[in-house]
Image (cartoon, rainbow, N blue to C red):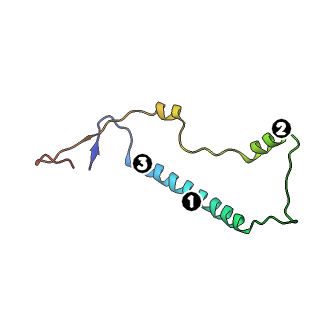
């Protein structure tokens, strides 16, 4: 199916860049997950394991700030701010959409 729009400012290059960025991000996450999985397989709980205890909530919050947070996808506000683009399918002479 071919889509066309007179009002759209999105070009094939924009879509290609978005796909490329997504592939790069996926590759980075794959590397992190592979390392995590390898480390998880090696994990064992015995008398040599090191445990960390936090004296208070502030220490735990500080650790979270150092480690950071994970975000998946766009926020609802960001999605709402995107332009609305409507596409119409072009029809062939036989009436079917292409």
Graded by Cα atoms within 10 Å as few (under 14), some (14 to 19) or many (20 or more), the crowding at tag 2 reads few
Mark 1 is surrounded, within 10 Å at the Cα level, by few (under 14), some (14 to 19) or many (20 or more) other residues, namely: few
Disc 2 from disc 1: Cα separation? 34 Å
- The correct choice, above or below, for 26 with respect to 7 in the image is below
Mark 3: secondary structure: helix
Q: Position of residue 7 (x, y in %)?
A: 32, 34
Q: Please name the residue shown 63% across and 60% down the image.
A: 33
Disc 2 + disc 3, Cβ < 8 Å: no
Q: Is residue 71 above or below residue 28?
A: above
Q: Nearer the viewer, residue 56 or 8?
A: 56
Whether residues under marks 3 and 1 lie with C-beta atoms below 8 angstroms apart, the answer is no
User: How many numbered circles are shown?
Assistant: 3
Local secondary structure at mark 1 = helix
Of the two numbered discs 2 and 1 in the rendering, the one whose residue sits closer to the viewer:
2
| Residue carrying label 3 | 15
Q: Which is closer to the viewer, label 2 or label 3?
A: 2
| Cα distance between the residues tagged 2 and 3 | 43 Å
Using residue 41 as the reference point, say whether residue 6 is left or right of it.
Answer: left
Query: How far apart are the alpha carbons under marks 3 and 1?
Result: 18 Å
**In front of the other: 33 or 1:** 33
Q: Which dot, 3 or 1, sits closer to the camera?
A: 1
- The residue at 47%/49% (across/down) is 18
Which of the two discs, 3 and 1, labels the residue nearer the N terminus? 3
For image coordinates 89% across by 43% down, the residue present is: 55
- Picture residue at 60% right of the left edge, 57% below the top: 29
The secondary structure type at the circle numbered 2 is: helix
In this figure, which residue is indicated by the disc labeled 2?
A: 58
Of 74 and 42, the residue lying toward us: 42
- Of the numbered discs 2 and 3, the one sitting upstream in the chain is 3
- Per the rendering, the mark at residue 53 is none
Circle 1 is placed at which residue position? Answer: 27
Q: Is residue 31 left or right of residue 5?
A: right
């Amino acid at each position: 199916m071919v889509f066309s729009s007179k009002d759209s400012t999105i070009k094939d290059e924009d879509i290609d860049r978005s796909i490329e960025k997504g592939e790069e991000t996926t590759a980075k996450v794959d590397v992190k997950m592979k390392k995590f999985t390898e480390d998880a397989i090696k994990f064992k709980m015995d008398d040599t394991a090191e445990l960390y205890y936090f004296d208070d909530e502030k220490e735990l919050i500080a650790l979270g700030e150092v480690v950071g947070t994970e975000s998946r996808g766009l926020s609802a506000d960001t999605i709402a701010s995107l332009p609305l683009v409507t596409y119409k399918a072009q029809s062939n002479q036989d009436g079917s959409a292409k």
